[in-house]
Image (cartoon, grey):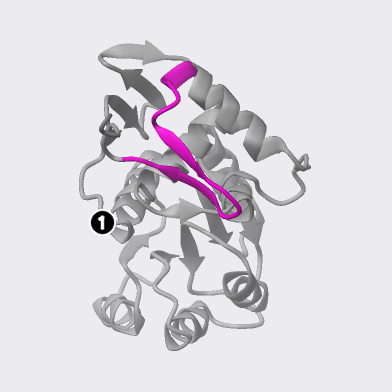
Amino acid sequence: MRILLAEDDPLLGEGLQAGLRQLGFLVDWVRDGAAAERELRTDCYAAAVLDLGLPRMDGMDVLAALRRSGNALPVLVLTARDGLPDRISGLDVGADDYVVKPVDLHELAARLRALIRRSHGRPQEILTAQDVRLDPAARSVEQAGKAVLLSGREFDLLQALLLNAGRVLSREQLEKRVYGWGQEVDSNAVEVHIHHLRRKLGSTLIQTVRGVGYMLLRDTPKT
């Protein structure tokens, strides 16, 4: 899952980026509010972690601009402003969750996963379709009760498809969900990963919608 981290403290930002990456997130890190507003307006993320005390543009203004544009992206506010009025203001402007610094990394990751699930109408932690079961926290996959070993990129791609089960995602949409800044993407990278997933999980799980993209089926097709 690709998220945007907006944090101006270099030590905290570096630590959160590294820690969240170890927990399975793709993290693009910006250090000021203007950059955060630009990225949220022009790029594709599953969620954002937004500090309020940002230079160039306050985090509250970034959040307000995002909501005015009609963007419902899940936003977790991360801030040292621990007063009740500040928390109420952030939630009223459109924050989905609010964490006061210092924050436990595993709690932050769990809150992000919950926000992303809810944004896709998936209240449960475990993602399922047909006989496939994916655990985002453990980064594990099972099929019919048996463990399936996936590469990191295959796991991220399967998770994106499961979160959007029943919806067609284009190659470009999938690339944006599983690749971060500065990562080279071969022109056929998504197709190769889809091929590997089909080889490991069977050919009925992921359908090709010719000329459009790929769709993961919730239920096994009837024959």
Q: Is residue 109 left or right of residue 209?
A: left
Q: Report x, y in % for residue 181.
A: 71, 51
Name the residue furthest top: 146
Compared to residue 166, the image places residue 99 above or below, namely below
Amino acid type shown at disc 1: Gly
Q: Is residue 102 left or right of residue 33?
A: left
Front-most of 213 and 153? 213
Q: Is residue 6 left or right of residue 48?
A: right
Residue 61 appears in the figure: yes
Front-most of 52 and 113? 113
Q: Report x, y in % for residue 31.
A: 66, 65
Taking the spot 43% from the left edge, 83% from the top edge, the residue there is 70
Give, as a single range, the part of the protein colored magenta: 200-217
Taking the spot 66% from the left edge, 48% from the top edge, the residue there is 180
Indicate yes or no whether the magenta region holds residue 204. Answer: yes
**Residue that mark 1 sits on:** 121
